Amino acid sequence: DDLASAEGNLAFALLVSLAQSQRELPVACIGLSPWLLLDLGKIPTVRREHRSDTSKFWGGEVMTSLQRMAAGKDLGDVSRAMMAGKLHDVVAAQYFQDHPASDPLVSPLLAPEELVRNFPPVLLHAASNEPLAADSQEMAALCSRAGVRVELQLYPETQHCFQLFPKKFPTAARDSMARIFSFLNTVWPHGHGQGQEQDQEYEELSEQDCEECEQEHEQEQEQEQREQEQRRQQQQQQQQLYTADELQTRSIKELLAILEGRGVSTGDCIEKRDLVERILMSQ
């Protein structure tokens, strides 16, 4: 099993179900920011570092998060705030509904140690500053107490399921993938001696992809900087006040740029003096 977020919950719930029925389990389980605790009564304790006094209400952080999402702001910050507040509780309740949220099939983190003892080796990766980091930390501790091999890695300055954004987090995404490959090499039975060669080839391709992602990310950053500079210049033009004499010294191209920056139509302007008058009227 190798799943993230809500799917990570299903992956660990599968382990619980298979262990309960004493059936064969997968050779390993990999969770990327898995959602392992849905019991609303226990969440404030487990994720206490991310639960503020206002997060239990609809106002404050939740509404601010929705506003930031609508404005297209940093979705990493939005997801952290949403997973730490009331909206998280509502989504969780929609999943378990009338079923007890304390059931390990719903909240795998609440599985008893004697059951977890049957789990295969587990690898857990999460962003260190996301609310679900606590779920990974608690599951790692539970597996350790039960004698199950577990590897936990928390990545600072990233976001929920950052592996999906290699352009934004190239170093962390590359390190996470490399650790996953290394982990699987130790637990996955390779046939005919080809496994390690295939993994090495896959790692080389992945590294090449990450390098390309870094280059694309740098290009996107440069483009964003150019666009920011253009917006800054447009704002300066919008705020700057001109006199008629000053505008008369400008070229038609410069006058058109000023009007464009102010969002003023120039369709009915025939002569230069028309552009000058339109700028003066827009001030």
Image (cartoon, helix red, strand yellow):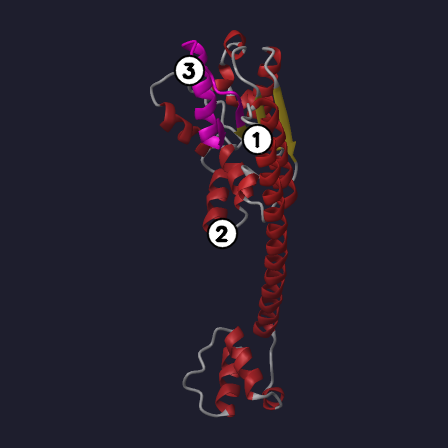
Secondary structure state at the residue bearing disc 3: helix
- Would you name the residue on which mark 3 appears? 17
Tell which circle, 3 or 2, labels the residue nearer the N-terminal end.
3
Using residue 269 as the reference point, say whether residue 182 is left or right of it: right
Using residue 151 as the reference point, say whether residue 25 is left or right of it: left
Q: CA distance from mark 1 to mark 3?
A: 30 Å
Q: Which residues are magenta?
A: 1-30
Q: CA distance from mark 1 to mark 2?
A: 43 Å
Q: Mark 1 touching mark 2, by CB under 8 A?
A: no
> Badge 1: few (under 14), some or many (20 or more) residues near its Cα, within 10 Å?
some
Residue found at x 59% / y 62%: 223
Report the residue that reaches farthest toward the left: 98
> Badge 3: few (under 14), some or many (20 or more) residues near its Cα, within 10 Å?
some
Amino acid type of the residue that numbered disc 3 sits on in the rendered structure: Ser
Kindly report which numbered mark, 1 or 2, lies closer to the viewer in this rendering: 1
- Would you name the residue on which mark 1 appears? 195
Residue 139, quarter of the rendered image = top right
Amino acid type of the residue that numbered disc 1 sits on in the rendered structure: Gly
- Would you name the residue on which mark 2 appears? 72
Kindly report which numbered mark, 1 or 3, lies closer to the viewer in this rendering: 1
Residue found at x 63% / y 30%: 182
Expressed as whole percent of the image width and height from the top left, the position of residue 203 reads 61, 39
Q: Is residue 21 magenta?
A: yes
